[in-house]
């Protein structure tokens, strides 16, 4: 049973690219490191290959603050877009300063063909309450702006 305090968030983005291009962007390590993580952070020590099930981990560093943020989980399912729709799902938990994993939540990236390109639906489920959902909303919106620029260079990042 789901915790009464748990919260879910979802984001939908359309891109002027083929569904296979979007799939590579959300599953291949060389693509993920270009956009994964909010603006103002860089990735280090990342082991993220969302093309197959298994563990994943990523450490992010704040460019200005120098703060370290580690997140990890298990890739639970991968279904490539063989018939126009594909999904990758994984668990998500932040680590504390002693490297202990916090509450676990669930993320999925679903890609699908559209008449003008491809659509990404990013769902983050089972977050520990409204405040956590608000923080993740800010983080995912910032992260998706980086993906927007990667897939559609006309979408410039603000300076």
Image (cartoon, helix red, strand yellow):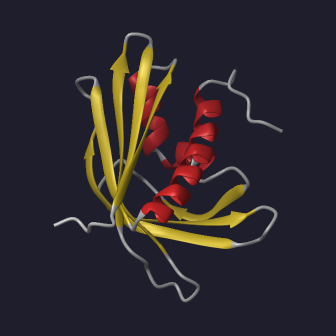
Quadrant in which residue 87 is drawn:
top left
Image point (63%, 52%), residue name: 38
Q: Nearer the viewer, residue 21 or 85?
A: 85
Total marks placed? 0
Q: State the quadrant of the C terminus.
A: top right
> Relative to 46, is 125 on the left or the right?
left
Q: Position of residue 149 (x, y in %)?
A: 65, 31
Name the residue at 58% across, 53% down.
139
Image height of 49 relative to 72, above or below: above
Query: Is 144 on the left or on the right of 24, as rendered?
Result: right
Compared with residue 124, is residue 26 higher up or lower down, i.e. above or below?
A: above
Q: Is residue 157 at all visible to an observer of this figure?
A: yes
The percent coordinates of residue 71 (x first, y second) are 50, 68
Q: Is residue 55 visible?
A: no
Q: Quadrant of residue 126?
A: bottom left
Q: Residue furthest left?
A: 1
The N terminus - image quarter: bottom left
Say left or right for 40 vs 36: right
Q: Position of residue 41 (x, y in %)?
A: 70, 58
Residue 115 on image: x %, y %: 38, 10
Residue at x 46%, y 44% (from the top left corner): 28
Q: Which residue is outermost to the bottom?
A: 98
Up-down: is 34 above or below 152? below
């Amino acid at each position: 049973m789901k915790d009464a305090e748990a919260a879910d968030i979802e984001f939908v983005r359309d891109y002027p690219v083929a569904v296979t291009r979007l799939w590579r962007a959300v599953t291949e390590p060389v693509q993920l490191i270009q956009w994964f993580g909010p603006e103002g952070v860089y990735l280090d020590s990342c082991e993220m290959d969302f093309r197959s099930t298994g563990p994943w981990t990523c450490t992010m560093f704040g460019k200005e603050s120098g703060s370290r943020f580690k997140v990890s989980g298990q890739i639970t399912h991968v279904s490539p877009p063989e018939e126009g729709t594909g999904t990758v799902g994984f668990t998500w938990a932040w680590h504390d300063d002693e490297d202990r994993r916090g509450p676990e939540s669930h993320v999925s990236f679903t890609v699908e063909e559209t008449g003008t390109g491809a659509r990404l639906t990013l769902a983050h489920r089972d977050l520990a309450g409204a405040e956590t959902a608000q923080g993740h909303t800010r983080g995912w919106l910032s992260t998706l702006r980086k993906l927007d620029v990667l897939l559609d260079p006309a979408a410039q990042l603000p300076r």
